[in-house]
Each structure stands twice: as structure tokens, then as C-alpha cells.
Image (cartoon, rainbow, N blue to C red):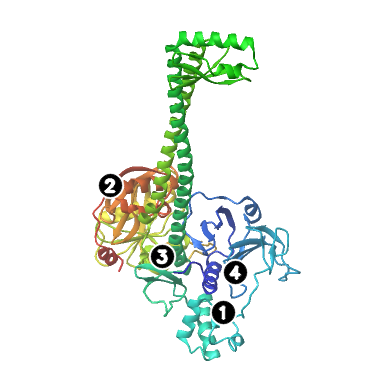
């Protein structure tokens, strides 16, 4: 199983990042452990950098926090370009404020270095921020020093002459190729021929860096085993294809990262439980000791009370002997006895007698009355009982804490197992928000301005109906018409979807107006002197209207075998699409909390909903919401869904 991205993978990541986020500003900088997250652009895209990968991600881990030093340097800076300077597992995110160098090596590290001046390094780039200080035989990384790149003990395989004396056994090591890439090159070409081997490698490198890419996850024996920008003949297994390599990388590595986090949490809980068990054992011993000593003191006190007169007589005689001769008293006192009471020792410093009271030992001062001695022992018994009770309360709290840790350790692993999503290839329409109307017609809506543009330009046909809420900042929504006229219910459901996925929801409106036209009457040609921006369109001719559309959505999950698909749809249509769903309306609960509340409600009805994380549901919630109800549905077969989008 691949544990981290290769140099070939980084070429593909860099190519896609340059196409998708280059030129956009870094909005936020977060960290969790050794992971760095950059939020970029108006669409709030997330770039994650950790020991496994550098890629776009749609998943914000829990418990992230700002990285103040890096944040101060990078926030507001423009991401200019992403580069892989050498064929190595090092990638550079260049901004106008400096370059974030990420080393996917052992150990993993990241450094923000000064931007190059006039394209030259001029003696090296100074380190402005450093994840970890590092020192080895080859280099040292310290804040304020010039950045020294990792040493390379291999030839750059991007050049043909590097292959001339590198082919044969150990080729991968001499060229810095991973084992998988070396095997794949040799499967595509005769590795005994340097030029042929280089051409095979170059073809793969060009596909990764420039395209056309064919991003895949190789699934072997039901497990995601390998992710690559191009399929590997030598890996085999089932190929799950993706629209972008970053999407494939995110899908592949989140499972590893979530599993690692779960195992780490479970290990921490078990270690803490082990330490607590040792403390608990000591606390139990202390409690038992206090209880035994309290009982002993009580019995001694009672024995003194039962022998008051005998003790008074013995003490009078002891005082007389002590007054006669202090020096000889210790020896003479040992012979004193009255009935079953006898002296067994004397402490000269404390002037106290150690007495045997019929098998119980008591210590009484020469000038102490038997009554006072009894009260002393009863008081000691009371104090020891109080300590034992206190120890018992401490033990109770420790036992509760121990049970909590044990449950946490078990829960961390079981919750991960329950939440693992099966890797699956998405249908083309799943990149958009989608649903199927009660009349069986497919509806699509853009998630952002880019998707609005793509939906109208590439996927909307002349006979389809285009819907849009009568406000700026709404999703382009398309009702697909494959024959016949849509029913009024189809029109209304598409209008509800368009109104709900608009800024009407964010504004807290309960209803709004929606217009619709044929696809043939939507275009980008603006009148002279005007401009139509990205995600906006011109509408030609008369519009149809649906007035006073109520804003409401069903947000839920459908399960197709082991695949869990999050979905949103109008409440009247969602029961035919999801196994379990929540009905939401505009409200006061921010999207993240609303998504968590929806997820918790879904899990109560169907535990399989653990496979969907809150971040996936956030994407389906238009804005601040309130959860009205959670219900079970009876969805149509996935084949019927696919038919609606043919």
C-alpha cells in the first residue's frame, strides 16, 4: 500500500494546483500536529501538506488551530506557482511573500523561505519559518539560516543521458525512482535499452505534469492500495477513476490519515489507562491500609476503655519507679504488669510506654490518663476512616476515568471502522449537487461559479429548463428534459432546489421567487458595453415564474452496497433518494454545527451514516439552518438514478 506521494505524483499535483489555485490569495493558515492547511481563494479551497501528501482536500480535520508564525508570513499572500524543482519528493508553493518548501522525506519537514530575487537565489534563500529544526551529516536547517535542499544521490531521470549508465539492476536507486515506478517503466519498455526506458519514463512524467492524466486508485482485494495520475500495468486490481488527481489523492489518503489518527488516539488512551491503573492500584492499597489501621485503632481504644482501672494502677506504679530512678526505669518498667496488661517497651524521648493489652498494642504517655489515650485512639480511627473514605471517592473517580479511557480506546478504533467509506468511482453528475424529481427527471445545480459555468456551457441542452432564484449569488439549476413535458411537481421541486441553494437561505428568508427558461435561451453574449462575469448568464425572451417558493431541503445519505452517498433534495423528493434524511430550513445554527446535528440524527436511525463525515454534509447545507425532523426513506435503485441523467 502506498504510504506517501512519489515524485511522479507531485508533478501531477503541481500541474493541477497551478491550473486551479495559482494566482489566488492565501486566506487562512491552520495546523494540526505536523499537518499544514492553507485555505486559498474566494472559494476557500484547502491545500493540505503532511508526511503523506500535498494536495487539495475537501476535509477539514477536527481540532485544527492557527499557526501564528506561518500565518503572519503567508496570510494575504498570492500563490503564484507550484513547482517540483527536481524529480524528488520535494514540492514548492511559491508566493509573492516567500516559498513554502514541503519535503515528503523522512523526516517530514516544511520551511518558508525568502522569495527569489530576479529569479536568482543570490547565495541561498533565508528560512523565515521552519516546522522542525534539523541537523544531519549533509545539512542543517535553522530559522534564519539559508535553506539547503536535501542531498540527491541519484541522477535526474528527466534527462536521457541519466539512463545511459543507470539501466539494469538498481536502476531505480540510481535514478531516484520508486520501486513501483521502476517496475512500471520496465513493463512498458525494454529496460536494457537506455533510450527506450527513458522514453517510457518521459511519457509517464509528461502525462503526470501536463496531461492528459488518467487519475486512478488501484483497488486490490477490496482495499485501496495505490493512487497514481496514470494507471500502472504492474499494480493491477480494479481501477477507480477520478476527474482530477487531487481528488483521487484526497480520497485515498484521508482513510490512512483517519486510521492513523484513530490508532494514535486509541494508543494514547491505552497508555493513559495503563498509568491510571497503576495509580488506581496504589490508591486501593492506601484505602485498604487506612481501613485496617482505623479498625486497629478503634479496637485499641475499646481495649483501653475495658482496662481503665488496671491501666491507672499500672501507670501509677510506672510513675513512681520513674521518679525513683530515671536511668534504670527502662529495665524496671519491662517487668510491670497488671492482670493481662504488661509493659513491652519504653520510649525515653517521648516518655511513653508501649503496652500489650491482650494481643493489642497501645502507646500511652507516662503522664497521660487512660481516658485521654482511649480518645486519642478513637480520634485516630476517625481520621483514618475519613482518609479511607476520601481514597474511596478518589478511586471511584479514577475508575470512571479508566472506563472512559477504555471506551475511548475502543471507540476510536470502532468509530473509524464504522466511518470508513468505500472508494468508488463517481458518476459525472455527482460532481454537481443533484437529485431526481418525483416524476423521475434529473436536476443538477452548481456548487460554485465555476460549476455554474460548466453546467450551462457543457451539460445543459437546448430542451432542458434553466432555473435561478431571483437574487444574485444563486446556483444555476438545470431540469433535464429527455422527452415530454415536465409535470408541475417537477417544476416546483426544481424551483425549491434553486431557491434553497441561493443567498436567500443565507439571508434567513423563508421563501423567494424563482424564474425558469428553456436552455436555448441562456447564453453569455452581453449587450454592447456590458460584461457577463463567471457563473453569470444572459436570459433571452420571456421567463416563467414560480412565486413564493418555500426554502427547505432534505439532507441525507443513500447506501448502494458498501457505498455511502450524501445527497440533498427538496423534502418532497428526498425520501425516494435517501435511506435516511433530515429536513432543514433556514435558521440560526451555523453550517458546521448544523451538519454535525444532521449527522448525529442520521446515525441514530441508521448507524451506517457514520461513513459520511460532517464535512460532506456541510457542502449540502446552504447556510445557517435548523433541523426540523429526521426520517427514514425508501430510495430507488441506483440504476434508476443513473437513467435520469442519461
Q: CA distance from mark 4 to mark 3?
A: 39 Å
Dot 3 or dot 1: first in sequence order is: 1
Residue hosting label 1: 173
Q: Residues within 10 Å of mark 1 (few under 14, many from 20)?
A: some
Tell me which numbered mark, 2 or 1, is placed earlier along the sequence: 1
Q: Are marks 4 and 1 in contact (CB under 8 Å)?
A: no
**Seen in the image, is 358 located left or right of residue 88?**
left
Tell me the quarter of the image containing the C terminus.
bottom left
Query: Which residue position is annotated with label 2?
Result: 631
> Label 3 near label 4: C-beta < 8 Å?
no
Q: Nearer the viewer, residue 57 or 646?
A: 57
N-term mark: 4 or 3? 4
Of the residues tagged 4 and 1, which is closer to the observer? 1
Question: Where residue 72 sits in the image (x, y, percent)?
Answer: 65, 52
Structural distance between the alpha carbons of marks 2 and 3: 34 Å
Q: Is residue 363 left or right of residue 572?
A: right
**Whole-percent x and y of residue 173?**
56, 79
Gap in angstroms between the C-alphas marked 4 and 1 = 17 Å
Question: Label 2 vs label 1: CA separation?
Answer: 57 Å
One can see residue 535 in this view: no
Residue linked to disc 4: 90
Instruction: Indicate left or right for 549 with 330 as reference.
Output: left
- Of labels 2 and 4, the one closer to you: 4
State the image quarter where residue 152 is shown: bottom right
The residue lying furthest to the right in this view is: 123
- Which of discs 2 and 3 lies nearer the camera? The answer is 2
C-alpha separation, residue under disc 2 versus residue under disc 4: 49 Å
Q: Circle 1 — which element?
A: helix
Mark 2 surroundings: few (<14), some (14-19) or many (≥20) residues within 10 A? some
The residue tagged 3 is 456
Quadrant assignment for the N terminus:
bottom left
Q: Position of residue 539 (x, y in %)?
A: 42, 61
Amino acid at each position: 500500500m502506498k504510504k506517501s506521494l512519489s515524485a511522479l505524483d507531485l508533478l501531477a499535483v503541481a500541474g493541477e494546483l497551478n491550473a486551479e489555485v495559482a494566482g489566488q490569495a492565501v486566506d487562512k493558515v491552520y495546523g494540526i500536529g505536523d499537518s499544514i492547511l492553507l485555505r486559498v481563494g474566494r472559494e476557500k479551497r484547502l491545500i493540505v501538506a503532511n508526511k503523506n501528501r500535498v494536495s487539495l482536500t475537501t476535509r477539514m480535520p477536527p481540532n485544527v488551530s492557527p499557526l501564528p508564525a506561518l500565518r503572519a508570513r503567508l496570510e494575504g499572500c498570492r500563490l503564484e506557482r507550484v513547482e517540483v524543482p527536481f524529480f524528488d519528493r520535494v514540492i514548492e508553493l511559491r508566493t509573492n511573500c516567500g516559498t513554502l518548501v514541503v519535503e515528503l522525506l523522512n523526516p517530514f519537514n516544511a520551511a518558508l523561505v525568502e522569495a527569489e530575487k530576479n529569479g536568482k537565489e543570490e547565495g541561498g534563500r533565508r528560512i523565515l519559518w521552519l516546522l522542525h529544526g534539523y541537523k544531519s551529516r549533509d545539512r542543517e536547517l535553522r530559522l534564519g539560516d539559508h535553506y539547503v535542499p536535501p542531498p540527491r544521490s541519484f541522477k535526474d531521470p528527466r534527462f536521457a543521458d541519466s539512463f545511459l549508465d543507470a539501466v539494469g539492476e538498481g536502476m531505480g536507486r540510481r535514478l531516484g525512482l520508486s520501486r513501483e515506478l521502476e517496475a512500471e517503466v520496465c513493463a512498458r519498455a525494454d529496460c536494457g535499452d537506455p533510450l527506450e526506458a527513458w522514453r517510457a519514463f518521459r511519457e509517464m512524467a509528461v502525462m503526470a505534469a501536463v496531461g492528459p492524466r488518467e487519475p486512478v486508485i488501484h483497488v486490490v482485494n477490496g482495499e485501496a492500495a495505490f493512487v497514481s495520475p496514470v494507471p500502472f500495468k504492474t499494480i493491477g486490481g480494479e481501477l477507480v477513476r477520478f476527474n482530477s488527481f487531487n481528488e483521487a489523492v484526497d480520497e485515498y489518503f484521508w482513510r490512512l490519515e483517519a486510521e492513523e489518527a484513530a490508532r494514535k488516539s486509541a494508543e494514547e488512551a491505552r497508555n493513559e489507562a495503563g498509568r491510571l491503573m497503576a495509580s488506581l492500584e496504589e490508591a486501593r492499597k492506601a484505602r485498604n491500609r487506612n481501613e485496617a489501621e482505623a479498625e486497629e485503632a478503634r479496637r485499641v481504644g475499646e481495649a483501653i476503655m475495658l482496662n481503665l482501672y488496671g491501666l491507672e494502677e499500672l501507670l501509677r506504679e510506672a510513675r513512681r519507679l520513674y521518679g525513683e530512678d530515671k536511668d534504670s526505669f527502662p529495665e524496671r518498667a519491662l517487668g510491670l504488669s497488671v492482670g493481662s496488661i504488661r509493659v513491652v517497651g519504653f520510649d525515653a524521648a517521648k516518655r511513653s510506654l508501649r503496652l500489650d493489652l491482650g494481643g493489642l498494642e497501645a502507646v500511652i504517655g507516662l503522664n497521660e490518663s487512660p481516658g485521654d489515650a482511649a480518645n486519642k485512639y478513637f480520634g485516630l480511627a476517625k481520621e483514618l476512616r475519613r482518609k479511607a473514605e476520601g481514597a474511596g471517592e478518589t478511586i471511584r473517580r479514577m475508575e470512571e476515568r479508566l472506563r472512559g479511557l477504555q471506551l475511548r480506546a475502543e471507540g476510536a478504533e470502532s468509530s473509524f471502522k464504522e466511518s470508513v467509506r468505500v472508494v468508488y468511482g463517481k458518476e459525472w453528475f455527482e460532481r454537481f449537487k443533484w437529485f431526481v424529481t418525483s416524476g423521475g427527471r434529473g436536476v443538477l445545480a452548481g456548487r460554485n461559479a465555476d460549476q455554474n459555468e460548466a453546467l450551462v456551457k457543457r451539460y445543459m441542452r437546448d430542451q432542458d429548463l434553466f432555473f435561478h432564484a431571483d437574487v444574485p449569488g444563486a446556483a444555476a439549476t438545470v431540469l433535464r428534459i429527455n422527452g415530454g413535458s415536465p409535470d408541475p411537481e417537477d417544476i416546483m421541486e426544481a424551483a425549491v432546489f434553486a431557491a434553497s441553494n441561493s443567498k436567500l437561505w443565507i439571508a434567513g428568508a423563508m421563501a423567494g421567487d424563482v424564474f425558469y427558461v428553456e436552455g436555448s435561451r441562456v447564453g453569455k453574449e452581453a449587450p454592447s458595453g456590458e460584461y457577463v462575469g463567471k457563473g453569470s448568464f444572459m436570459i433571452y425572451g420571456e421567463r416563467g415564474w414560480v412565486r413564493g417558493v418555500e426554502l427547505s431541503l432534505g439532507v441525507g445519505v443513500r447506501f448502494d452496497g458498501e457505498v455511502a452517498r450524501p445527497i440533498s433534495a427538496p423534502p418532497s423528493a428526498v425520501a425516494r433518494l435517501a435511506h435516511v434524511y433530515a429536513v432543514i430550513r433556514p435558521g440560526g445554527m451555523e453550517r458546521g454545527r448544523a451538519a454535525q446535528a444532521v449527522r448525529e440524527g442520521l446515525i441514530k436511525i441508521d448507524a451506517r451514516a457514520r461513513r459520511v463525515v460532517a464535512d460532506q454534509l456541510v457542502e449540502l447545507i446552504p447556510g445557517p439552518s435548523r433541523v426540523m425532523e429526521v426520517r427514514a426513506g425508501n430510495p430507488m435503485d441506483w440504476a434508476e438514478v443513473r437513467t435520469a441523467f442519461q
